[in-house]
Image (tube, rainbow, N blue to C red):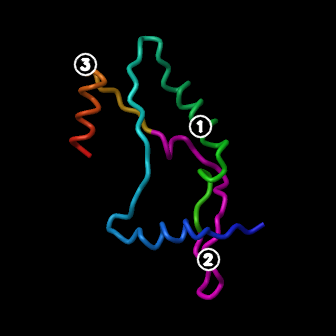
């Protein structure tokens, strides 16, 4: 079944003409103990991300006159392409989050 972009999808595309284009992301700031297992967290996030179909899709343009773009499923989603981790040694959560706000 072909799923075309919705009116909301098209509005987001048309309004996203800035250079660089809009990117959406999320950051988790975690205070962890010695038992923290980063690979285990990455595996858990990978399982959850792959369970949301839209996160595995991208919009594909169609030829002029053939309607709105269509959603296409990406065959494989690698957590390496969407997840990154950073360790900020010796910083508290408050310091780290304010540093991130200032650098963003």
Which residue corresponds to the image point at 64% horizontal and 46% vertical from the top-left?
Answer: 52
Label 3 environment density (alpha carbons within 10 Å; few <14, some 14–19, many ≥20): few
Say if 16 sits above or below 41 in the image: below
Which segment did they paint magenta? 60-83
Image location (x, y in percent) of residue 69 = 60, 73
For residue 70, what is the image quadrant?
A: bottom right
Residue, disc 1: 46
- Distance (Cα) linking label 2 and label 3: 50 Å
Q: Residue 90's mark?
A: 3
Q: Which element carries disc 2, helix, strand or loop?
A: loop
Is 41 left or right of 3, judged from the image as shown?
left
Q: Residue at x 61, y 76 (%)?
A: 68
| Mark 1 Cα shell of 10 Å, populated few (<14), some (14-19), many (≥20) | some
Considering every residue shown, the one lying at the far front of the view is 7
Q: Outermost residue toward the top?
A: 34
Q: Is residue 104 above or below residue 17?
A: above
Q: Nearer the viewer, mark 2 or mark 3?
A: 2
Q: CA distance from mark 1 to mark 2?
A: 30 Å
Question: Image quadrant for the N terminus?
Answer: bottom right
Asked if 66 appears above or below 76 in the picture, the reply is below
Label located before the other in sequence (3 or 1): 1
What residue does disc 2 label? Answer: 68
């Amino acid at each position: 079944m072909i799923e075309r972009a919705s009116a909301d999808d098209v509005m987001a595309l048309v309004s996203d003409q800035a250079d660089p284009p809009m990117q959406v992301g999320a950051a988790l700031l975690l205070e962890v103990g010695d038992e923290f297992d980063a690979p285990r967290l990455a595996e858990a996030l990978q399982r959850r991300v792959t369970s949301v179909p839209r996160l595995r899709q991208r919009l594909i343009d169609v030829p002029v006159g053939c309607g709105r773009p269509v959603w296409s499923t990406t065959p494989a989603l690698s957590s390496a392409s969407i997840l990154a981790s950073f360790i900020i040694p010796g910083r508290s959560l408050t310091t780290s989050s304010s540093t991130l706000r200032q650098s963003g």
